Image: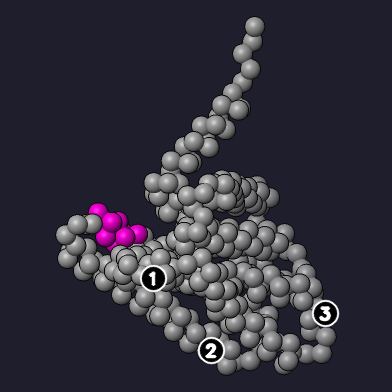
Amino acid sequence: MELVLNSSSWLQDQFPGELWVQCFLSIFLTITCFSLNFVMVFIYLKEPVYQGVLRYMLFIHLLVNDFLQTALAVLLFLFARFEGIMLLSACSVIVLLSACTSMNTPLNLAVMSLERYIAICFPLHHVQLCTVNRGYIAIALIWLMGILPSMSDISIAYAYGPLGYFQGYFNCRRSLFMILPSQSTKQVALNVVYFSSIWAVVIYTYIKIMLTARKATSDKSSASKGQRTVLLHGVQLILSMSFFIYPLTEYLFKGQTLLPIRHVRFFNYYVTMVLPRCLTPLIYGVRDENFKKHLKVYLSSCRKKVQPLQSN
């Protein structure tokens, strides 16, 4: 998210046509993502087959979280592209939400992997362990763990910043809240612990499900499907971490004349921030047999409703 928040420094030399093309691409993908997410959330709320099933609850939470993150990323991008400034107190809310939703996605994937692990390796206990109430608790813990790092940075900025700092107007970016040198060290350490723990959960559950699938004699298809699902969680986790390649790609292209650095930055923003979040419904929802069936029904009914009138 820092990629978007720091983008205002490279706006000066943009051409108007280029500006509007980039804005159109960002808004178009966001609207497309929202439309597909809306249909899936509507199906989830409408169809009884999804009610009370923890994995569907976690999937819908992932959809809503990723869309919120995408919308905030595009909002900050547009705000920066037009060189807007805002009250720092308002910026703190946007930074808090954007950073929190960024952290939530990997945590949600880890919980989804654990749910599949319990379903495959401990099927007799799955109903007792993976209840809706525990799903609500898991989602609450996800948000708590996601919000704490940014909340601590904002609190430090409020405590150690200059008098009236939060009443000033700035180009909104997270670095405005990094007042103390130790905050950068803390952020790096937290990211290492955070992503290492999540990868440990995903890898562990994948290995355990793989071993169970090999030992299974009766329900091999279910175990194999669970193994593929956790593998997809790993792919989605890689996509959610793709924004870490931003400093590397900018360093590699810095100083060359073939491709302007502003194009590299927009490509990084679009590919690492916006696109991965919009792939979530395709990676999970379209693959699920229930969602696929209901999507076909709802989309076909929509096509019938918008058929042009036949002339007499």
Badge 2 local density, few (<14 within 10 Å), some, or many (20+)?
Answer: few
Please give the residue where the numbered disc 3 appears in the rendered image: 167
Q: Residue at x 66, y 48 (%)?
A: 20
- Asked if labels 3 and 1 touch by Cβ distance under 8 angstroms, the answer is no
Q: Residue at x 71, y 62 (%)?
A: 79
Stretch of the chain drawn in magenta: 221-229
Q: Amino acid at mark 2?
A: Lys
Secondary structure of the residue carrying numbered label 3: helix
Side (left or right) of 266 relative to 176: left
Q: Can you see residue 263? A: no
The question of residue 227 being in magenta is answered with yes
x%, y% of residue 9? Answer: 65, 69
Please give the residue where the numbered disc 1 appears in the rendered image: 114
Q: Which of the two residues, 105 or 73, is positioned nearer the viewer here?
A: 105
- Asked if labels 2 and 3 touch by Cβ distance under 8 angstroms, the answer is no
- Give me the C-alpha separation between circle 3 and circle 2: 26 Å
Q: Amino acid at mark 1?
A: Leu
Q: Dividing the picture into quarters, in which one does residue 262 lie?
A: bottom right
- Give me the C-alpha separation between circle 1 and circle 3: 44 Å
x%, y% of residue 248? Answer: 44, 71
Q: Amino acid at mark 3?
A: Gln
Checking the image for residue 186, the label placed there is: 2
Q: Residue at x 60, y 82 (%)?
A: 148
x%, y% of residue 184? Answer: 56, 87
Q: Can you see residue 160? A: yes
Upstream in sequence: badge 1 or badge 3 = 1
